[in-house]
Image: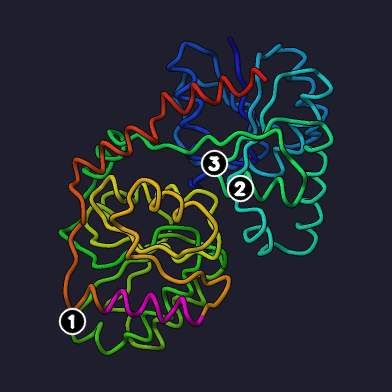
Amino acid sequence: MKYVIVIPTLTVGGAEKIALETAIGIHEKGHQVDIIVLSNRIELSVPSYIKIKTITKYKLFNILKYLRKEKVNGCISYMERANLYAAICCKITKTKYCASVHTAPKSGFSQRKLINKFFINLIYKLIKTLNSRVICVCEGIKKDLNLLYGINNSVVIPNFINQQEIATKANAGDLVNKYFDFIFVGRLSKVKGCDVFIDAILASHDIIIRNKVSIAILGGGPERVFLEQKIENANLSKYVLFLGTLINPYNHMRHSKFLVVPSYAEGFGLVVLEALSLGCNVIYSNCDFGPREIISRDFPEMTEFNIFDPSINRELAVDDLKKNMLNIIHNGVCLPISHEEIHRRIEDNYNRALVCEAIINSLEY
């Protein structure tokens, strides 16, 4: 069988990493997989057995041309732009198709610009009209899509991680014996909530200095300069390091006590599983949807580390995060369940082989 994945870029984002890992997982089940990238932005290392085709112009025409020529058995697309092109082309060519949605529609899409909101609404109304199957990475997304767009031809299939590969990467490279009390890993854009984290740090200024608390911010994006300047103005640059976007953030995560996920919205929150797998505890916002679903369902012992949803009340979220941080600094907190048990639960619920099998089966509707 031959399958194709369509995605706008192959950069270091969560959806992009999952798309590539899904291609690898489907290949491991004995199928051929191609990836169509709708740009020249390819940063991830792709195995030679997966064919990459870049389409930067006349996207509808060239995707149609590809589907007609290659006669693929199924197509999966990631992210809104790819979902639009793939849904139309697969309908025309009668190719089995699934769109995947990784963003919380109601709260996540509300962070977009007005023109983007218009096109997102158009895309999902089209998917509803075409009755395309939609893969949702959590239950909350499925409910949102039904509520907002009337989409009911959907299935929940979570994201997954490769724990062995993450452990291998975590032990690679030289960290120069640097350990962190708190770490943020993600794009420095509004929806990811690093501004909430930074304000909680500023509110804990004297305690951070007195206790020599070490904090790392991993990621790049439009808010980096602004957030870094706030730390510099508070004379906290010695304690809060901005390390930029890293292809391999795992050795830093392995040497951190707490990952902070203060998002305004999360579709899934892959970084939560990655951190837990590496023995790093998690403070997470009670936003829609992923981290809240992952922790409450599979790691209920860790629900005490949630903070208020910043999309509802940012000031309360900052205060909650500050209190969590101060409690950890003063009292210290260990993982409430064993590392071995965490590994077992992740393997049982977020396994690549099982997820890829579910994705293949979802094409047979």
Is 173 left or right of 66, judged from the image as shown?
Answer: left
> What residue is rendered at 50% in x and 41% in y?
43
> What residue is rendered at 25% in x and 45% in y?
170
Q: Quadrant of residue 57?
A: top right
Q: Residues within 10 Å of mark 3 (few under 14, many from 20)?
A: many
The residues tagged by marks 1 and 2 sit, at their Cα atoms, a distance apart of 41 Å
On residue 141, the disc is 2
Residue at the disc numbered 1 = 211
Which one is nearer the viewer's eye here, 166 or 263? 263
The kind of residue tagged 3 is Val
Which one is nearer the viewer's eye here, 49 or 121? 121
Q: Estimate the x, y position of residue 20 in percent, counting from the top left.
A: 50, 32
Q: Estimate the x, y position of residue 282 in percent, counting from the top left.
A: 33, 59
Q: Main secondary structure of the magenta part?
A: helix
Compared with 53, 12 (above or below) is below
Give the extent of the magenta segment.
Answer: 315-326
Q: Quadrant of residue 324?
A: bottom left
Residue at the disc numbered 3 = 137
Compared with 171, 205 (above or below) is below
